[in-house]
Image (tube, helix red, strand yellow):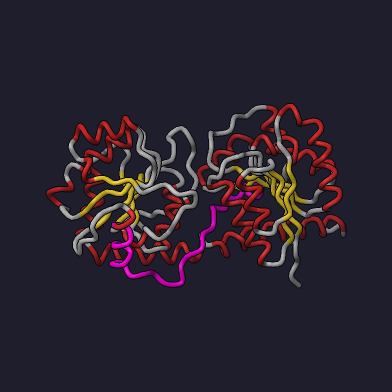
């Protein structure tokens, strides 16, 4: 018999990034599959408003340090009243009081979700969160899961890597139509031979230099290809482009509130850089989305990236310290269409099997059920 759960997510952030999108998408998947969901987050934040607009129960809690004592009591009241099976905290600030309040209120399953961020130090407050107040830790990559296991001496049955799920398309659109749409978005004349290479990730000075060295050589080898940067370029990077006289070879995709998927099929390949070198990297949802939409993937050989990019099988890995490896990977992708197509198909199958919303939801529910069985066996005195 199928079990339905009441689940409460907490988040203290006011931004609208991949963390908040994960909370909302997971909550909506759970709701569609019969579970009851509530979200506790500061009032007026994008997550609060979008959760409410989508028919989820929402509770406004600021999670500000000065309000901590009063809000701790309020959280206990919510948990006692709602009687959830699961409380899932998504950040250190909300976890400090939400998981403790859930423990005091007798919530059966408490989870700390650790998304991308700075590596966690072994301090007393962190130890309380990861070893006392929660039953399990969810991460978005094997690297971050391994880091937490080592830092807090956690077992394999305490930490689980469950990357963000996506919704793969049922069928891919026509690539020519996608190229024309992308050209119009960039303000270019959609000529028949126009081609695009996408760039994802943070464009800091080192990344720009790495990319620009490759871009300078594109004119001779791939005269019809333009580079499309999906993140904002700052004045320093623009000045570097102008100095290298390749400004006309690079275009920046207009920024929108939501990540759109329509441009992926218009790219002949996508190049992925880390969001921030000082952060540990989860499996980027941008990579799995690109794979799902049939875009050949090139990424730096780094933790998180290589969870999903297997060199020569689902994409190509490049050396962060060797800029020439990027041009080699681009040449390999564009000049070997049969091998590229095989990698792209393998990547798409991988995402459909392991990185879809359904796969993510099933993995989460499986852990809920395992914990439920553990509680029932304990209640019955079964060892």
Relative image position of residue 101 (x, y in whole percent): 80, 40
x 74%, y 70%: residue: 2
181 vs 8, left or right, is left
Please state if 145 lies on the left or on the right of 227 as rendered: right
259 to 338, vertically: above or below: above
Is 51 included in the stretch rendered in magenta?
A: no
Q: Position of residue 306 (x, y in %)?
A: 42, 49
The answer to which quarter of the image holds residue 52 is: bottom right
User: Residue 13 falls in which quadrant of the image?
Assistant: top right
Please state the horizontal and vertical placement of residue 307, each as a whole percent of the image: 45, 51
The image quarter in which residue 323 lies: top left
In the image, residue 169 lies in the stretch drawn in magenta? yes
Dividing the image into 4 quarters, which one contains the N terminus?
bottom right
- Marks counted in the figure total 0
Which residue: 71% across, 37% down?
Answer: 62
For this rendering, which residue is in front, 256 or 141?
A: 256
- Can residue 19 be seen here? The reply is yes
Where 126 sits versus 349, above or below?
Answer: above
Give me the residue at 76% from left, 57% from top.
Answer: 6
Highlighted magenta segment, given as a residue range: 156-183
Q: Position of residue 310 (x, y in %)?
A: 38, 55
Q: Nearer the viewer, residue 145 or 244?
A: 244
- Asked whether residue 317 appears in the rendered view, the answer is no
Which one is nearer the viewer's eye here, 87 or 44?
44
Between residue 296 and residue 260, name the one nearer to us.
260
Locate the C terminus and report the quarter of the image it occupies. Answer: bottom right
């Amino acid at each position: 018999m199928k079990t339905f759960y009441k689940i409460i997510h907490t988040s203290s952030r006011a931004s609208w990034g991949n963390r908040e999108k994960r909370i909302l998408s997971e909550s909506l998947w759970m709701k569609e599959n019969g579970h009851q969901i509530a979200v506790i987050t500061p009032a007026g934040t994008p997550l609060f408003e979008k959760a409410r607009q989508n028919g989820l129960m929402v509770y406004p809690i600021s999670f500000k340090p000065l309000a901590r004592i009063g809000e701790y009591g309020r959280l206990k009241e919510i948990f006692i009243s709602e009687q959830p099976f699961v409380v899932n905290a998504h950040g250190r600030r909300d976890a400090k009081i939400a998981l403790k309040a859930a423990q005091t209120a007798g919530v059966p399953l408490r989870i700390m979700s650790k998304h991308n961020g700075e590596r966690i130090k072994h301090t007393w407050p962190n130890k309380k969160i990861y070893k006392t107040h929660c039953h399990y830790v969810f991460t978005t990559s094997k690297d971050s899961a391994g880091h937490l296991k080592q830092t807090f001496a956690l077992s394999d049955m305490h930490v689980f890597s469950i990357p963000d799920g996506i919704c793969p398309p049922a069928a891919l659109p026509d690539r020519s139509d996608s190229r024309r749409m992308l050209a119009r978005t960039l303000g270019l004349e959609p000529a028949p031979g126009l081609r695009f290479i996408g760039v994802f990730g943070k464009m800091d000075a080192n990344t720009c230099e790495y990319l620009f060295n490759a871009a300078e050589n594109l004119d001779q080898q791939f005269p019809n290809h333009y580079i499309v940067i999906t993140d904002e370029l700052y004045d320093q990077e623009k000045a570097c482009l102008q100095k290298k006289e390749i400004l006309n070879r690079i275009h920046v995709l207009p920024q929108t509130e939501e990540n759109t998927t329509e441009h992926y099929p218009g790219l002949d390949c996508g190049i992925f850089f880390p969001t921030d070198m000082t952060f540990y990297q989860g499996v980027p949802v941008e990579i799995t989305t690109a794979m799902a939409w049939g875009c050949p993937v090139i990424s730096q050989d780094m933790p998180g990236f290589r969870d999903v990019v297997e060199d020569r099988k689902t994409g190509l890995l490049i050396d962060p310290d060797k800029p020439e490896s990027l041009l080699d990977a681009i040449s390999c992708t564009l000049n070997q269409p049969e091998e590229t197509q095989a990698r792209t198909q393998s990547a798409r199958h991988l995402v459909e099997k392991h990185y879809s919303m359904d796969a993510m939801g099933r993995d989460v529910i499986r852990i809920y059920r395992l914990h439920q069985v553990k509680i029932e066996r304990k209640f019955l005195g079964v060892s």
